[in-house]
Amino acid sequence: MKRPIRTLLQAPSVGLLFLWMIVPLAMTIYFSFIRYNLLNPDVHGFAGFQNYQFLWEDPAFVPALINTLALIGSVLIVTIVLGTLLAVLYERRFFGRNVATLLVIAPFFVMPTVSALVWKNMILHPVYGLLAHAFFAVGLTPIDWFGRFPMVSVIMILSWEWLPFAFLILYTSIKSLDREQREAALIDGAKPVQMFFHITLPHLKRAIGVVIMIETIFLLSVFAEIYTTTSGGPGTATTNLAYLVYSQGLQQFDIGIASAGGILAVVMANVVAFFLVRILARSLKGNT
Amino acid sequence: MESSRSRSWLFGIIGWLVAIVLFFPIFWVAITAFKTEQAAYSPSLIFSPTLESFHEVFARSNYVGFALNSIYIALGSTLLCFIIAIPAAYRMAFFPSAKTQSTLLWMLSTKMMPAVGVLLPIYLLFKSAGLLDSVWGLIGIYTLINLPIAIWMSYTYFREVPSAILEAARVDGAGIMSQIWHVLTPMALPGISSTALLLIILSWNEAFWSINLTSSHAAPLTVFIASYSSPEGLFWAKLSAASLLAVAPIMVMGWLTQKQLVSGLTFGAVK
C-alpha cells in the first residue's frame, strides 16, 4: 500500500486527537492569564498571575485542594484494600462464584447521578434510609450522614462506585498468578499470610499501580456526585477542585480565575499520567 | 481434607455476603420502583407490587425524550468513533511503521487530560457555535473522549487476524474499504462488538459533560436523574422507577462484556 494512503487512513484520528489535546488546553492556559468575566465585558486585558493569586486568596481554594486530595486518597485506600481482599477471596472456588462476581461488579455500571441520589436519599437518609432502619433495629441512634459527615458520605458513594473497578482489575490479575510457583511455596510450608505478602502482593503490584492512576485521573474530575448531593456544601465541606472550577466559571462566570483552577488540575493529572504512560509503554513493548 | 472442605464453605458464605451487600442498593432500587410512594419509606420487603410509579414517571415528565437522547448520543458517538478509528487501527495493525507504538501511546495519553481542565474553553466554544444543549455537541465530545479506547481495542483485535487473509483479498483485487468491510470486520466481529458495548456503557453513564453542556432539549438520562436531586428526590418510588429503567439495560451490557472490560479500561496493561 502506498505511503500517502496509509497516512490518510490514520490522519482523521491523529488530527482530531491532536486538536482535542492542544486547542482547549491552550485556551485554558490563555484564559488563565487574562481578565475575562462573562458578566462584565469591560474588564479585559493581560492579568499576569493575578488569576492564580485570586484563586489562592479564594477562601474556598485551600479547602477545595485539601478536599480533592482527601477524596482521592480515601477512595484509593478503600477501593484498593477492599478490592485486593475481595480478589483474594474470589480466587477460591465457591458455589455460584461467577454469579456472585456479576453482583460485585454491578455498581460500576450504575450512572453516577443515580448512585449519588439513591445513596443520599434511600440509604443515608437520617430517618427513612436503610442505614437508619438498621441502626434503629439494633437500638442505636441513626447518623445524619450528609449533615454531620458530608465528605465521608461522598467518599462512601464514590468508593461503592469504584470498588468494582478495582476488584475486577485485581481479580483479573490474580488469576494470572503462576499456579506452580504457588504450589512450590505451599510445599515449602508457606503460611497463607506469608503467601499473600511474598507472592500474591508482589504479583499484583503492576495492577495496583494501574488502578491507582486510572482512578486518580477520574477522581480529579469528580463532579456529578457532588453536584447532585451537596452542591459543594455545607459551606465548602465537599467542594473539590472540579466543583470550584464549575462554580467560579459557570456560576460566577469568572473565566479567568476558573481557568487557573483548571490548569492546576491538569498539572496534578500530568504528574500521575507520567507514571501511567511509563507502565503502558512497558506493556506495549511486552506485547510485541 | 475435612477442614479444607469446611473452609471452602466459609469462603463461599463470606463471598456471597459481600456480593449481596454491594448489590443491595441496586436491588433496593428495583424493589422500591414497584412500591407506592407511601410504601417506599418503609423497609418492608412485603408489599403489593404496582406499576404506578412507572406510569407517573412517563406521565409527568418527558422520559421517552430523555431516553431517546441517551440512545442517540450513545449510539451516535460509538458509530462515529468506529468510522474514525477502524481505518487507523487497520493501518497500525497491518502496516505498522517505526512510529506506530509511540503514536498509540500518545493517543492513549490524551485520555489523561482531566475533564475539568478543559471545561471552560469547550463550554465557550460550544456557546459561540450554538452547540450548547445539542445532541450533536455531546456526540462530538464523547467521540473524542472514547476514540483512543476504540483505536486501541480495534488494534488489538485486528492484530489477531492473520495478515495472509488480507493479502489474499488484496490479490483478488479488494480495495481498502472492501478489505475492512468484507474481510476484517466479520473476522474481528466479537472483539468489535464488545468494544462497541464498552463505548456505549461509557457514553451512557458519562455525567460531567452532559450536566455541564446540556439542560433540557438534548439532556440525556444522567441529567434527567440529576433533576431529581431536589425536591423530587423525596419521591423515592418515582426516583427508583426512573433509575431502574436508566440503569438496567446498561448493566446487562456490562455483564456481557465483563471479560473484555479489563483490557479495554486499562489499555491492555492488565489482561
Image: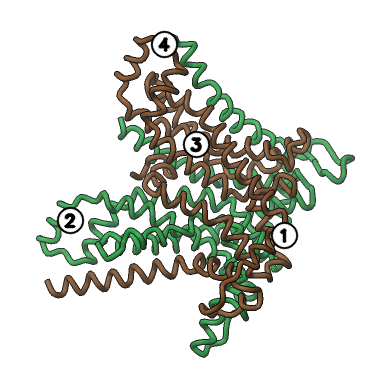
Chain colours: A green, B brown
Instruction: Check whether the beta carbons of the residues at disc 2 and disc 3 lie within 8 A of each other.
Output: no
Sort mark 3 into few (<14), some (14-19) or many (20+) by Cα contacts within 10 Å. Answer: some
**Foreground: disc 1 or disc 2:** 1
- Check disc 4 and report its element: helix, strand or loop: loop
Read off the residue under disc 2.
A182
Q: Residue at x 24, y 66 (%)?
A: A193
* Residue type at the position of mark 3: Ser
- How far is the residue under mark 2 from the one under mark 4? 49 Å
- The location of residue A61, given as percent across then percent down, is 68, 57
Q: Amino acid at mark 2?
A: Arg
**Which residue does the numbered mark 4 point to in the structure image?**
A1
Residue A267 in view (yes/no) = no
In three-dimensional space, the C-alpha distance between marks 2 and 3, rounded to whole angstroms, equals: 36 Å
Crowdedness of circle 2 by 10 Å Cα count: few (<14), some, many (20+)?
A: some
Question: Given the current orientation, which residue lies at the most extreme right position?
Answer: A42
Q: Which residue is mark 1?
A: B59
* In the image, residue A255 above or below residue A126: above
Quick check: do tags 1 and 3 share a chain? yes
**Residue A70 location, x and y as percent?**
55, 61
Q: CA distance from mark 1 to mark 2?
A: 60 Å
- Residue name at image x 36 percent, y 49 percent: A207
Whether residue B168 is situated above or below residue A129 in the rendered picture: above
Front of the two marks 2 and 4:
4
**Residue at (87%, 40%) from the top-left corner?**
A41
- Give above or below for A178 relative to B149: below
| Pointer 2 and pointer 3 on the same chain | no
Nearer-the-camera pick, B80 or A70: B80
Is residue B171 among the parts visible in the rendering?
yes
Q: CA distance from mark 3 to mark 4?
A: 29 Å
Give the image quarter of residue B51: bottom right
